[in-house]
Image (cartoon, helix red, strand yellow):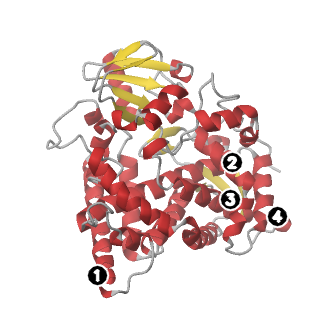
């Protein structure tokens, strides 16, 4: 049993700024890290107003207000393009960025395809990718040098999404190239860039680093190559029955239209982003949290002994792993901020909000809110069985958003994450090092600033390790 170093009792958290800073200081903090640019008081506020020369924004933490924006009146609060402007070079006009009639048309095609593929049908892809991840980590197990675990979880999550989308393992040449380019894009693209503050016409280029633009172009070119090859297979009647085929052959029930090749590239890009980035981030943080809480690590490893063959029914038995993964998503929500825009006048908490105002919903602050959660900064997977945890799960837990625009792959992720976590814990014991304590930073998702380094040890046969 590893003793937990005292300094690692509370999981790493971003240090919030002082309440009052100058505009120029705020811009500098914003450019470096959007989350730590926010004041500490947001962890206890129900609503906060921010005024800048460029726009007015309101951060919402009160569950009733969040419900109104995301669930009961979603069409009155469409997605703000202040997020989209930073992601458009990669995601184009994908379902993640569109609004109104265009978004509804895309969802009419995508939703049935996801329902038809089914998590049960995707389970073998998750299992195969998990076994490949175990095989790769065996090369590092027992060595004195730590391993950057984010790289490994990114590899595993990318393997799952390529097997699910295109029936291709990550060892496929094109899939591997997409993965390598995505690593460049992920590290170079912040959650929000300066173009999100300064509103320019869509036809003007944004403030993107050269490697960001180059990697986005490369990813889209490679995805287009895969998509055209799949279209040829569909035409020839030889296409595998996977997610890409289902989406490309699904017709809009209202117009009978299908996605064009260009539209399909947009959608595949967001599926890869949502299905790979979010899972990789959450899985890496889960392994770190378990490494710093060895009592929970041993519980999950013991539970994982039931995983002896690819039986979908075994997923329902991974209850501890699911609790750990859920708690990880609370502490480190992969997408830490969502931005909507008010279309009409509204009054929230006696404040009149004008059309065009930015409505910011931050799972990062909501999930650690001191007036909602017991022990908000602590790692406690057992909380989900308490009255407080159950109440917050209903009203204050939105790692996948909620309402009409809830993440399409939420159910997929809640099977994939606990399964991969259990397969890894069944075979290995992970050790955290005080000299490698990660600091969370928001890139496309919440990652660690200098990598997430853990030592890996072979798991004894005590828990049925392979």
Extreme residue in the front direction: 254
Which one is in front in this view, the residue at disc 1 or the one at disc 4? 1
Q: Which residue is mark 2?
A: 324
Q: Earlier in the sequence, mark 1 or mark 4?
A: 1
**How far across and how far down the image is residue 254, in percent?**
30, 60
Question: Gap between marks 1 and 4, in whole Å?
Answer: 47 Å
Q: Categorize mark 4 by other alpha carbons within 10 Å: few (<14), some (14-19), many (20+).
A: some
Which one is in front in this view, the residue at disc 3 or the one at disc 4? 4
Q: For this view, does 317 lie left or right of residue 452?
A: right
Which one is in front in this view, the residue at disc 1 or the one at disc 2? 1
Q: Nearer the viewer, residue 189 or 224?
A: 224
Q: For this view, does 109 lie left or right of residue 8?
A: left
Q: Which residue is mark 4?
A: 463
Question: Gap between marks 1 and 2, in whole Å?
Answer: 43 Å
Name the mark on residue 456.
3
Q: Earlier in the sequence, mark 2 or mark 4?
A: 2
Q: Which residue is mark 1?
A: 232
Q: Are marks 3 and 4 in contact (CB under 8 Å)?
A: no
Q: Find residue 412 and report its image quarter.
A: bottom right
Q: Secondary structure at mark 1?
A: helix
**How far across and how far down the image is residue 54, in percent?**
25, 23
Question: Gap between marks 2 and 3, in whole Å?
Answer: 19 Å
Depicted 307 relative to depicted 297: above or below = below
Q: For this view, does 210 lie left or right of residue 292?
A: left
Q: Earlier in the sequence, mark 1 or mark 2?
A: 1
Extreme residue in the right direction: 462
Q: Residue at 60% x, 47% y: name it.
A: 285
Which one is in front in this view, the residue at disc 3 or the one at disc 1? 1
Q: Earlier in the sequence, mark 2 or mark 3?
A: 2
Depicted 361 relative to depicted 24: above or below = below
């Amino acid at each position: 049993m590893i003793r937990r170093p005292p300094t690692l009792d509370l999981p790493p958290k971003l240090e919030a700024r002082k309440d009052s800073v100058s505009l120029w200081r705020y811009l500098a903090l914003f450019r470096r890290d959007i989350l730590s640019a926010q004041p500490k008081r947001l962890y206890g506020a129900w609503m906060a107003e921010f005024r800048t020369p460029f726009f007015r924004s309101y951060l919402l933490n009160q569950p009733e207000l969040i419900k109104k924006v995301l669930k009961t009146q979603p069409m009155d609060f469409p997605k703000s393009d202040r997020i989209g402007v930073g992601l458009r070079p990669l995601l184009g006009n994908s379902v993640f960025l569109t609004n109104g009639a265009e978004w509804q048309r895309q969802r009419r095609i995508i939703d049935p395809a996801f329902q038809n593929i089914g998590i049960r049908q995707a389970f073998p892809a998750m299992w195969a990718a998990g076994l490949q991840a175990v095989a790769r980590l065996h090369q590092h197990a027992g060595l004195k040098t730590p391993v950057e675990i984010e790289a490994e979880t990114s590899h595993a999550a990318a393997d799952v999404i390529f097997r699910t989308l295109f029936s291709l393992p990550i060892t496929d040449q094109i899939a591997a190239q997409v993965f390598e380019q995505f690593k460049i894009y992920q590290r170079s693209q912040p959650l929000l860039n300066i173009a999100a503050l300064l509103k320019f016409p869509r036809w003007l280029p944004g403030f993107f680093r050269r490697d960001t633009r180059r990697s986005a172009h490369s990813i889209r070119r490679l995805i287009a190559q895969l998509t055209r090859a799949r279209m040829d297979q569909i035409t020839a009647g030889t296409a595998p029955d996977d997610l890409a085929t289902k989406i490309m052959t699904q017709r809009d029930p209202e117009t009978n239209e299908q996605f064009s090749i260009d539209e399909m590239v947009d959608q595949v890009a967001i599926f890869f982003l949502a299905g790979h980035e979010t899972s990789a981030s959450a899985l890496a943080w889960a392994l770190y949290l378990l490494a710093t809480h060895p009592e929970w690590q041993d519980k999950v490893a013991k539970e994982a002994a039931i995983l002896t063959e690819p039986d979908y029914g075994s997923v329902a038995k991974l209850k501890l792993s699911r609790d750990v993964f859920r708690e990880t998503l609370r502490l480190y929500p992969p997408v830490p901020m969502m931005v909507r825009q008010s279309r009409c006048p509204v009054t929230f908490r006696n404040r009149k909000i004008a059309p065009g105002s930015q409505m910011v919903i931050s799972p990062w602050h909501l999930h650690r809110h001191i007036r909602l959660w017991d022990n908000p900064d602590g790692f406690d997977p057992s909380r989900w069985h308490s009255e407080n945890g159950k109440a917050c799960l209903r009203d204050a837990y939105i790692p996948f958003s909620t309402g009409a625009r809830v993440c399409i792959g939420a159910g997929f992720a809640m099977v994939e994450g606990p399964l991969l976590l259990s397969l890894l814990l069944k075979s290995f014991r992970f050790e955290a090092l005080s000299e490698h304590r990660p600091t969370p930073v928001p890139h496309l998702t919440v990652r660690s600033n200098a990598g997430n380094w853990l030592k890996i040890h072979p798991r004894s046969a005590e828990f049925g390790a392979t």
